Amino acid sequence: MPSSLSSFPFTPLLLVLLTAAAAVPSPPSPLVHDICNQTSSPSLCVEAFSADPQTTTTTNNKTAMVGTAVRLVGNTSGSTYIYISDLTNQPPRPVGRAGQKRLHICGMCYLSVSYDMLLLSSALSDKSYGALASQAAEVAAQARRCDAAFSKSTWQPMGNRNKMLVVLCEAIRVLCRSIGH
């Protein structure tokens, strides 16, 4: 009888279990909790940082954590812009004219956010935490504008996307204040 792992009947199960164990995020650091508790949605903030595999290596240092937060803002805003574009390119019938108008407003907001991301990245590389906090506030304002476009609609295609972006921007502002002092 060959002595290889492939002959062991539970090898696929073992591989699944090992893969699942490796994919389980580690618990958020006390710094993540401290920063997130100062945002409008601490649980959403912790969720955002916990879902990111690189967070565990950066969340014991405020300067590294602000870099992680800026990267998460970029990822979130980019995927949201693509999502809005996909919805906008659907035939008008499913979303209607009012829905198309709301999506256009959101598209313009997130187009502005893409420009703001350049400024965020520049402020981060210059370690200009005051400018970084100001740009984060502008990104959050754009996400709120998009959210407001759907405030009187029963159709809520954005889900938590805008709120996630706002909370990440709030975390950046909290971090910038604490680094600046």
Image: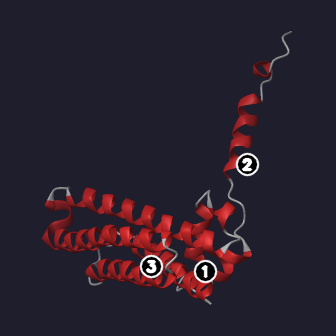
Crowd class of label 1 (few under 14; some 14 to 19; many from 20; radius 10 Å): many
Q: Which amino acid, mark 1?
A: Cys
Where in the figure is residue 58, as x and y percent of width and height?
66, 65
- Quarter of the image for the C terminus: give it: bottom right
Tell me what residue is drawn at x 45 percent, y 74 percent.
123
Where in the figure is residue 163, as x and y percent of width and height?
44, 77
Q: Which of 63 and 144 is in front in this view?
A: 63
Circles 3 and 1, Cβ within 8 Å, touching? The answer is: no
Please say if 1 is above or below 119. Answer: above
> 68 left or right of 120?
right
Spatial distance from mark 1 to mark 2, Cα to Cα?
26 Å
Residue 36 - label: 1
Tell me what residue is drawn at x 80 percent, y 23 percent.
8
> 78 left or right of 69?
left
Spatial distance from mark 2 to mark 3, Cα to Cα?
31 Å
Q: Which amino acid, mark 3?
A: Val
**Label 3 SS:** helix
Crowd class of label 3 (few under 14; some 14 to 19; many from 20; radius 10 Å): many
Spatial distance from mark 3 to mark 1, Cα to Cα?
12 Å
Label 3 or label 1, whichever comes before in sequence order: 1
Q: Hey, which quadrant is residue 45 in on the image?
A: bottom right
Q: Which amino acid, mark 2?
A: Ala
Please say if 19 is above or below 38. Answer: above
**Label 2 SS:** helix
